[in-house]
Amino acid sequence: MWFFNDEERELQKVCRDFALKELAPFAQENDEKEQFNIDAFKKMGELGLLGITADPKYGGAGLGATAATIVMEEFGAVCASSTLSYLAHAILCVNNIQQNGSEEQKEKFLPKLISGEHIGCMGMSEPEYGSDALGIQTKAVNHKDHYLINGAKMWITNAQYSDIAYIYTRTGKNKKDLTTFILEKSNGDFSVGKPIHKMGMRASPTGELIFENSKVPLNSRVGNEGESTYHMMKNLEIERITISGISLGIARSCVDQCLKYSSERKQFGKKIGDFQLIQKMIAEMSTETEMMKHFLYSACKEYDQGKKGPVMAAQVKLALPKMATKIALDAIQLHGGYGYSREFQLERYLRDNKLNEIGAGTNEVMIMIIAKTLLKESQ
Ligand SMILES: Cc1cc2nc3c(=O)[nH]c(=O)nc-3n(C[C@H](O)[C@H](O)[C@H](O)COP(=O)(O)OP(=O)(O)OC[C@H]3O[C@@H](n4cnc5c(N)ncnc54)[C@H](O)[C@@H]3O)c2cc1C
């Protein structure tokens, strides 16, 4: 990108090299076996990527959404599953603690999460509350010197591997009476249900967190009671922007594979790239991918400069995953039967990308946020 600075270009190179060496060779097998690439995850810690947005004083890189999105794009281009787990750890857990935790909490949790010694997750969704996130029912009751937490969190990325869980609870009757806690597996603060088997993102572990009379100390609470709606909304912005980087990576890989295949595969005595219908697909896919790239990174830059908020994040999240699904479908079409087979990995890209139209808020929820806000502002 013309507006990447030298540091961002260097990060892009480091991530691309890492992705090709540590993620790409294992992506297909891990997808088939539903296996988390924990070795690569630990190495991300050695590279300093697990605390990409965290303060250097805790071991973080002190960078913003642009840098985090570069990581997502480069990793997403070869293994979306590993990237989703990275996002859950670095953006949903680490970044949340960095933004909202007390000094004591940051000192206690961030260094081990950033080095990769600990793995983190974030629990917002529940079995009965997904899009309606402010309706969550996991309850935390204040007993003066401790809290008792009861309930369950559903669809939690990294659940089975997490040492630390950043979870939202209900502490009052009003819709916005939400309070966050940082829970520790080693203290028995949560248990983990059965793994969830999925259509895509199969190498990213997903599970349920269960709280049965979990007794947690007061100092595991983040901020004051009832402050978490703002925290939640704020973190969803960076989550929606950065997860879209995975879709960009997927689209880019689809275009690359189509270009290669079009000059290799022959039918009717010609390379399929000589047929105008194939050329049309390539022209459109590559143009759409360029549009995705420019929209996403200009949104990242604006976000990092504090210029734009929830609407832009929702627009990015609505546009990119949808376009990447279309591009992955076109790429399968261009490859014919081979595209439909497992050999070419395109079907994995399609299955993986579909999650990005659901997780971090569905397409329909993005439409709701964009339309409601713009219509309200225009009145
Ligand atoms: C692989 C995976 C990983 C995930 N990781 C995490 C995680 O780490 N942490 C976490 O907290 N959550 C996680 N999630 C949960 C994810 O954020 C939710 O799945 C998502 O928010 C949608 O919620 P839901 O699945 O309950 O769908 P629902 O909210 O039940 O939606 C069902 C359908 O109704 C539509 N709908 C809902 N409300 C409206 C409305 N008002 N208007 C129009 N249509 C509407 C939705 O768009 C959807 O099509 C993950 C999910 C998956 C699949």
Image (spheres, rainbow, N blue to C red):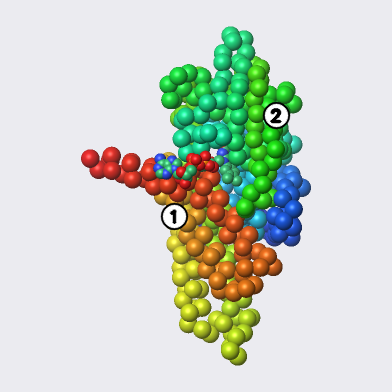
Judge from the rendering whether residue 245 lies leftward or rightward of residue 17; answer left or right: left
Residue highlighted by disc 2: 191
User: Which quadrant of the structure image shows residue 337?
Assistant: bottom right
Q: Mark 2 vs ligand 1: CB under 8 Å?
A: no
Can you give x and y, in whole percent of width and height, for residue 111 in the image? 69, 33
Figure quadrant of the C terminus:
top left
Rounded to the nearest angstrom, the CA distance separating label 2 from label 1 is 36 Å
Give the crowd class for mark 2: few <14, some 14-19, many >=20 residues within 10 Å.
some
Can you give x and y, in whole percent of width and height, for residue 160 in the image? 71, 38
Can you give x and y, in whole percent of width and height, for residue 258 in the image? 58, 72
Mark 1: amino acid: Ala
Q: Which residue is drawn at 58% across and 89% down?
A: 268
Can you give x and y, in whole percent of width and height, for residue 303 in the image? 45, 44
Instruction: From the viewer's side, name the closer residue of 97 and 81.
Output: 81
Mark 2: amino acid: Ser
Q: Residue at x 56, y 34 (%)?
A: 127
Judge from the rendering whether residue 305 lies leftward or rightward of residue 352; answer left or right: left
Q: What element carries label 2?
A: strand
Q: Which residue is drawn at 49% across and 63% down?
A: 326
When the figure is inspected, residue 36 is found, relative to residue 344, above or below; the finding is: above
Furthest-front residue in view? 128
Furthest-top residue in view? 144
Give the crowd class for mark 1: few <14, some 14-19, many >=20 residues within 10 Å.
some
> Which circle's residue, 2 or 1, is located before the other in the chain?
2
Q: Which residue is drawn at 56% across and 55% down?
A: 353
Residue highlighted by disc 1: 319
